[in-house]
Amino acid sequence: MRLQLSPEMEAFRDEMRTFFTTQVPQEIRDTIAAHRHLTRDQYVQAQRVLNDAGLAVPHWPVEWGGKDWTPLQRHIWREEMQLANVPEPLAFNASMIGPVIASFGNQEQKERFLPKTASLEIWWCQGFSEPDAGSDLASLRTTAVRDGDDWVVNGQKTWTTLGQYADWIFCLVRTDPTAEKKQRGISMLVFPMDTPGVTLRPIQLIDGGHEVNEVFFEDVRVPAENLIGEENRGWDYAKFLLGNERVGIARVGATKKLISQAKTHAREVVVDGRPLSEDPRLTARIAELENELLALELTALRVVANSADGKPHPASSVLKLRGSELQQAATELLVDIAGPLSVASFADGGSQVPQWARVATPEYLNYRKVSIYGGSNEVQRTIIAGTILGL
Amino acid sequence: MDFTYDSEQNDLREAVAGLLGRAYSDSEQRRRVTATDPGFDEKTWARLAEMGVLGLPFAEEDGGMGAGPIEVAVVAEEVGRVLAPEPFVEAVVLAGGLVSAVGTAAQRAAVLGPLAEGGSVLALAHAEPAARWSTSAAGVTATQDGGTWRLSGVKEPVPNGARADVLVVSAVTDGGTALFLVQGDAEGLTRTGYRTHDGGRAANVTLDGTPAELLGEGTADRSADVERAQALARIAYSAEAVGAMDTALKTTAEYLKTRKQFGVTLNRFQALTFRAADMYVSLELARSTALWASMVADTGGDVVTAAVRARLQTSRAGRHVGKEAIQLHGGIGVTAEYSVGHYTSRLTAIDHLLGDGDWAADRLAATVDSYPTVDPLGAPYTG
Ligand SMILES: Cc1cc2nc3c(=O)[nH]c(=O)nc-3n(C[C@H](O)[C@H](O)[C@H](O)COP(=O)(O)OP(=O)(O)OC[C@H]3O[C@@H](n4cnc5c(N)ncnc54)[C@H](O)[C@@H]3O)c2cc1C
């Protein structure tokens, strides 16, 4: 066993840190640090900077821009990015559809999509969930029927994150309604969001923001060559994609950042003449949270180091489950430190309430999502109980 | 960063697992052993000595194996896995660790050699009825009488205090807390042993002008040495707790698959499988932290803080896993015939021997404002 990073890894970490803190525009990093939303252009700009330096998709195959890094390097890359307030490469592109196309797409699809996916020239969105297919994703009903050289798609998707910015959607569709197992009759199609017959309707979330949408398909004609992989094998690709999603989702660096901000703010809030940072109940709560986070980070390091041949370690569900809980706990901590100031959520320029206190509650409410999406925490428990404990 | 054991560490683990697994393959065997004094099996203790386990962390010139905290953790985890009642952490890591850190060359050879060979059991008499996980002594005072040190006062509870051949006793001197060696047959020494809830043994140790040998040289305050030895023991206990939790969870999962109620096995009830899944989460996070702390100790990082962190994580996890293990078994979980309650009992004892989760959280809380983020990588962590 070895604790320290090797000198090479130390150097690698420094290199990442320097790059992220000097090459990504300050304004973008400030926006992230202040917990404000980025514009579409800012996302694209940030990802271009990373991609131009070969740092947007290091986990892809080398011929498509990957880096052949060790799991530890990928971990450091991700952590440093979060600590530097750099927006991560769009997950739909970098960790979802990109790896699927790289693994299961044909040569023509790879050439057509992968470079633009890495550079965010194509902004992808994920069309999996439907009103009656959430945790039970395989019960999805959107159909695709073959008509000559096209597929004709009808149905509805929901929860489509940032669909309003998206150029293309990757969709799970039912292509064989007669398949014995419902998982067997599903395929994966990709098509532009401006294809005739696609309509988007925004959904507002409890923080008042607009990040998810409903998407309706009415006789949408999709060329046959836009089928990814084989017909009726879409479920396999979806599982592959969701497994990748889980590994990056612990977001330890981001939670560290939140806790460190909480400490700073606790010094600024004065209660009965003493800063909140001296309240033993608060400091004990921070100590417990930090220790949980330490345990999670160490587990992430154990898990990434022991992932065999690219398959996620079984304990990766621990990362998603506890990672989401700790992100939520950190946002809750910030609300509690803001206390009564947190009520001024939508105060404008005339308010004395600091920005961090204004965004605290909306963010806390928004972060309720992290234990729901990407396989809810109940789904993760089912995986642990079934796959690991054999129950 | 590498969390895997090397081949020597794996060999050690297999050897210890083999020995202890044979000795305590069914929990009846353990119950028989813990039912009679001294609460552990002298033969198993002797075999551990033959294997080199009882001298593991001591220097070779002191009769030890010259191994480090990681090897200690490997052994402690196996001890925990079968709840071996042999006092590995208490005698070797804690009491032996102090002698190794503080003793003169002659004392180390005289005390650690026989300990490593299995000929002598060592106990640390440091806890006092009126103190709580302290690094200093208050209730026993040491005075010099001619050339001889004499100790008076009470130590309790002293794990294995009645069985020990030699006691390491902390006492107050003009210089602060000093450490002494007291022979088991010394005059003015009264030891009243009793069972502890986890099947172990502890004692009230009363000293009344008892002659003692100063450990090490000079009477400068030894609190920092005590704290460091406690830290190493906390890390070993964390590993022991991980071993115990691992078995408690496996036993529980097995039970859920076989126990039938309402016409189906219990694992058909999602409410129960989810609770088992949460036990797994607690266990794995505790395992990571315990492993990390042993690595910090091995590389000379801030062992005191790392130990507190490991203690916090394993304390919370130990209570969670221990309590749920019993609950998911239903009535059989609280019976003495069944193993799972004993695991919970031992986890509870570990929690209280050197500081529980609240104690650890309080210690960490005192410093949270002095650093921005916790970083387990790179430079050794400094609190
Ligand atoms: C902000 C946000 C963004 C999202 N973005 C996208 C996106 O871009 N693309 C996309 O396709 N989807 C997206 N999703 C959808 C997300 O994946 C689903 O919300 C999720 O899978 C849960 O499905 P559901 O909401 O229908 O809840 P349900 O499946 O109805 O679950 C309701 C509750 O029951 C629990 N539950 C369900 N089944 C079980 C069971 N068998 N055992 C125990 N508990 C169970 C769930 O854990 C949950 O607590 C997003 C969701 C949110 C909230």
Image (spheres, rainbow, N blue to C red):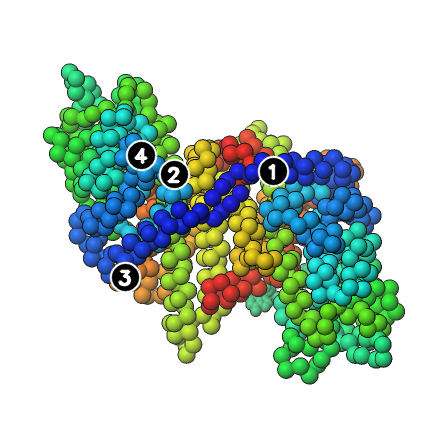
Q: Quadrant of residue A126?
A: bottom right
Q: Is residue A263 visible?
A: no
Sequence-wise, the earlier of marks 4 and 3 is: 3
Q: Determine which residue is flagged by label 3.
A: B26
Query: Mark 4 or mark 2, which is nearer the start of the sequence?
Result: 4
Q: Residues within 10 Å of mark 2 (few under 14, many from 20)?
A: some
The disc numbered 2 marks a residue on which chain? B
Which residue is denoted by mark 2 in the rendering?
B68
Ligand 1 has an atom within 8 Å of the beta carbon of the residue at disc 4: no
The label number, if any, that marks residue B60 in the structure image = 4
Q: Residue B171's image quarter?
A: top left
Q: Position of residue A328 (x, y in %)?
A: 60, 50
Q: Quadrant of residue A93?
A: bottom right
Cα distance, mark 1 to mark 4?
34 Å
Distance (Cα) linking label 2 and label 4 = 12 Å
What's the amino acid at mark 4? Answer: Glu
Of residues A146 and B55, which is closer to you in this image? B55
**Which residue carries the number 1 mark?**
A8
Q: Share a chain, discs 1 and 4?
A: no
Amino acid carrying mark 1 in the image: Glu
Query: Ligand 1, what quadrant?
Result: bottom right
Q: CA distance from mark 1 to mark 3?
A: 48 Å
Measured as percent of width and height from the top left, residue A275 is found at 57, 31
Q: Are circles 2 and 3 on residues that touch, CB within 8 Å?
A: no
Is A64 in front, or is A239? A64
